[in-house]
Image (cartoon, rainbow, N blue to C red):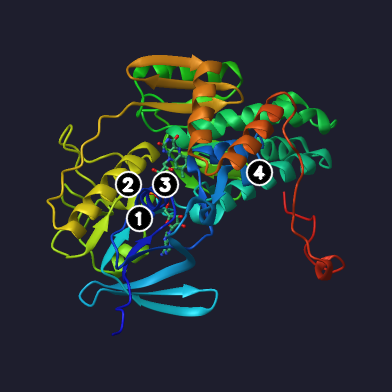
Amino acid sequence: MSIPPPKAIVIVGGGFAGTTLARALDARLPDGYELLLLSEESHTTFNPMLPEAVGASVFPEQVVAPIRQMLKRARFVMAKVNAIDTARRTLTATTLAGELSLRYEHLVLAFGNRARLDLVPGIEAHALPLKTVGDAMHIRNTVLRRLARIELENDARVRARLGHFVVIGGGFSGVETAGELIDCLASIRGYYPRVAAHELAVTVLQDQSRLLTELPERLARAAHRSLAQRGVDVRLRARAVAVDERSVTLDNGETLSTATVICTIGTRANPLAERAGLPLERGRIVVDADLAVRDVPGLWALGDCALVPNADDGRPAPPTAQFAVREARFLAENLLAALDGRPTRAFRHRSLGAMAAIGHRKGVAEVLGVPVSGLPAWLLWRAYYLAQMPTLGRRVRIFVEWTWGMFFPNDITHLRFTRSGELDASRGGAGEAP
Ligand SMILES: Cc1cc2nc3c(=O)[nH]c(=O)nc-3n(C[C@H](O)[C@H](O)[C@H](O)COP(=O)(O)OP(=O)(O)OC[C@H]3O[C@@H](n4cnc5c(N)ncnc54)[C@H](O)[C@@H]3O)c2cc1C
């Protein structure tokens, strides 16, 4: 008698949604099923902490966690999924060992979305998006390079341009990035003796009448005040209409001279969702109340890539980490019910609040309707993300490193990954155009 091979439950995407789902299902599947998580990177990224990595108040490796350390029995394969055939229930992916083709019984799409770089002319060529840990490291290195460059520059106009950092977007990531940047510049300026305080500036452009529209007005005002007190130039109702190598143009015709534009606005659908021919609305996959993709048997979607109806308020769930985690726990139960032949339930979650870190040891939060700001909000923020880290050992290590980092200047190591063979190459190296 031959034993049939296990049926695969496959999750695509190792972000907040995919890893929470995998952990909730791990070792709970009935006999005859195996769980497989495919993701294009071997780690999960704590996106809300990326601005802190930009501001060098945490190291990049402290905002990621290895997916393998999160799983017990489930299998992980680092793979980029390229195509899905929902009729045959198969998918193909690129792995380190070449193309992988596999059949699934149930497939869960948790592949998030991508940065959109065509909202303002010039953004794709000249602005720095913030969506991945690679983006955060690139921005951090760019900031350090700009300071090192000002040290060597004599032309006052070029110095001013190099020292001006413009952040497009006054939502969570824009406000967090601006707050981190201004604190980072203040903390590290002393290491660049030829750079004066007045030569460094951070501007935030927000095309709405206030910052942080995701938060109650009172907290948004507190965040605005805090940024302004630390010297950030917050421009409300200011929309960038063009970006080039040396400037940003606003809708009122004003031109800001800058060498560094960080873009935190705009997302677009993951190209895989479009290629698979799935029903999309506002760039997100349309799912039913139980998170099953409409009219496609065996297919489910959640997190940022899905338009999930929330039975609590009848509105689509927002694309946030808090909702991605809740949806994942919910979907785990629905999947187990589906395998068992039991009815599934409609997703329902009432937000517990929202938090934003707006600089070193500063935050704003609303938790269960109670507004909190300053250091307590920032500690809450850190505690929340620390609790999400896998394994006790990693949590303790990061707690010690974060605590240590709170009392010392930000790190100014500019890691360039230069390899031996490149050291004496005639081109490349430290040079850059002003
Ligand atoms: C800079 C920034 C700041 C943010 N701040 C906050 C905040 O303060 N609070 C908050 O609640 N939310 C915040 N968010 C949003 C939050 O991070 C997202 O809502 C959350 O990450 C969504 O989780 P997800 O699992 O759906 O998607 P993601 O976390 O984006 O994960 C998607 C995963 O899928 C993988 N993947 C993509 N395509 C493929 C493919 N073809 N094959 C295999 N794998 C693939 C990706 O590599 C990734 O691991 C922020 C986001 C950013 C970028």
Q: Which residue corresponds to mark 4?
A: 140
Return the residue nearer the eye: 344 or 133: 344
Which quarter of the figure is the N terminus placed in?
A: bottom left
12 is higher (above) or lower (below) than 189: below
Task: Look at the numbered disc 1 and say if its residue's Cβ is closer than 8 Å to ligand 1.
Answer: yes
Q: Amino acid at mark 2?
A: Ala
Q: Which residue corresponds to mark 3?
A: 16
Return the residue nearer the eye: 140 or 352: 352
Determine crowd level at label 2: few under 14, some 14-19, many 20+ residues with C-alpha closer than 10 A: many
Q: Whole-Å distance between the Cαs marked 2 and 4?
A: 32 Å
Of the image marks 4 and 3, the number of the one nearer the N terminus: 3
User: Residue 265's x, y, as percent?
Assistant: 43, 43
Of the image marks 1 and 4, the number of the one nearer the N terminus: 1
Q: Which residue corresponds to mark 1?
A: 110
Return the residue nearer the eye: 226 or 326: 326
Task: Look at the numbered disc 3 and say if its residue's Cβ is closer than 8 Å to ligand 1.
Answer: yes
User: Residue 335's x, y, as percent?
Assistant: 24, 54
Label 3: element kind: helix
Label 4: element kind: helix
Of the image marks 2 and 4, the number of the one nearer the N terminus: 4
Of the image marks 1 and 3, the number of the one nearer the N terminus: 3
Q: Amino acid at mark 1?
A: Ala
Q: Whole-Å distance between the Cαs marked 4 and 3?
A: 24 Å
The residue under the point 57% across, 39% down is 392
Relative horizontal placement of residue 162, taking residue 207 as reference (left or right):
right
User: Residue 200's x, y, as percent?
Assistant: 69, 30
Q: Which residue corresponds to mark 2?
A: 328
Task: Look at the numbered disc 2 and say if its residue's Cβ is closer than 8 Å to ligand 1.
Answer: yes
Q: Amino acid at mark 4?
A: Arg
